[in-house]
Image (tube, rainbow, N blue to C red):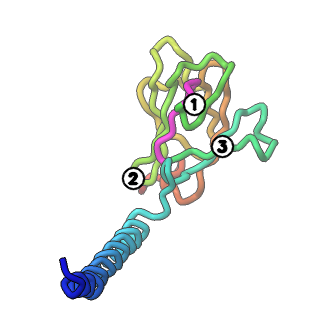
């Protein structure tokens, strides 16, 4: 390759491929930004584990500010390390219960065996049960007080929701 051919090739690379590369880079960044804005507008601020829908604390520790743990839109309660609400040393199963939110209402679902203790305010949970602000969830020997914000529709006296 002669020096003239090399200069011609370098010029083509500089004036064709560099702008093309920059155009593609800017286009990808713009698409990523638009997708981020769309998801934020339609799905809200969702973190890595989901949106925080409420808080829970062990009943004997609830007065301590550090005791309140977030309840995400799909929270597993149990003794396993992958549970979003982990309780150790109270006789819980690895996955004892699940708190989830559906159509603005909060529910607790049994994941443990029928012989295991799962109560809401002293009432046995057979499969799933709606839960409200201030309810006490008893899982084995652990008592968990729940704080669900007002944006969750359907209180105990709300027949129309």
Question: Does residue 135 appear left or right of residue 59 in this picture?
Answer: left
Question: Going 46% across and 42% down the picture, which residue do you hit?
Answer: 74
Could you say where residue 144 lies in the image, as x and y percent from the top left? Answer: 66, 33
Q: What residue sits right under mark 2 in the picture?
A: 103
Could you say where residue 125 lies in the image, as x and y percent from the top left? Answer: 49, 26
Real-space CA distance between mark 2 and mark 3, rounded to the nearest whole angstrom: 23 Å
Element type at mark 3: strand
Residue 14 falls within the magenta-colored stretch = no
Q: CB atoms at circles 3 and 1 under 8 Å apart?
A: no
Question: Going 19% across and 84% down the picture, which residue do you hit?
Answer: 5
Query: How many C-alpha atoms fall within 10 Å of the one at disc 2: few (<14), some, or many (≥20)?
Result: few
Residue placed furthest toward the top: 115
Q: Can residue 16 be seen in this snapshot?
A: no
Question: Does residue 137 appear left or right of residue 68 in this picture?
Answer: left
**Rendered image: mark on residue 111:** none
**Range drawn in magenta:** 73-81
Could you say where residue 122 lies in the image, as x and y percent from the top left? Answer: 61, 26
Q: CB atoms at circles 2 and 3 under 8 Å apart?
A: no
Q: Earlier in the sequence, mark 2 or mark 3?
A: 3
Question: Going 30% across and 77% down the picture, which residue do you hit?
Answer: 21
**Rendered image: mark on residue 69:** 3
Residue 79 falls within the magenta-colored stretch = yes
Where, quadrant-wise, is the N terminus in this rendering?
bottom left
Q: Earlier in the sequence, mark 3 or mark 1?
A: 3
Answer above or below: position of 59 versus 46.
above
Marks 3, 1: nearer the viewer: 3
Could you say where residue 91 lies in the image, as x and y percent from the top left? Answer: 63, 16
Q: Earlier in the sequence, mark 1 or mark 2?
A: 2
Answer above or below: position of 65 versus 118.
below
**Rendered image: mark on residue 120:** 1
């Amino acid at each position: 390759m002669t020096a003239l051919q090399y200069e011609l090739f370098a010029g083509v690379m500089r004036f064709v491929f560099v702008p093309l590369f920059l155009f593609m880079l800017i286009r990808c960044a713009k698409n990523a930004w638009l997708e981020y804005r769309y998801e934020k507008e339609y799905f809200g601020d969702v973190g890595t584990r989901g949106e925080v829908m409420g808080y829970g604390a062990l009943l004997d520790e609830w007065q301590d500010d550090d005791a309140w743990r977030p309840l995400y839109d799909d929270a597993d309660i149990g003794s396993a390390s992958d549970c979003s609400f982990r309780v150790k040393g109270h006789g819980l199963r690895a996955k004892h219960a699940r708190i989830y939110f559906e159509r603005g209402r909060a529910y607790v679902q049994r994941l443990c065996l029928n012989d295991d203790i799962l109560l809401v305010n002293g009432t046995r949970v057979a499969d799933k049960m709606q839960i409200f602000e201030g309810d006490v969830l008893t899982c084995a020997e652990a008592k968990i007080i729940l704080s669900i914000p007002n944006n969750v529709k359907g209180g105990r006296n709300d027949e129309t929701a």
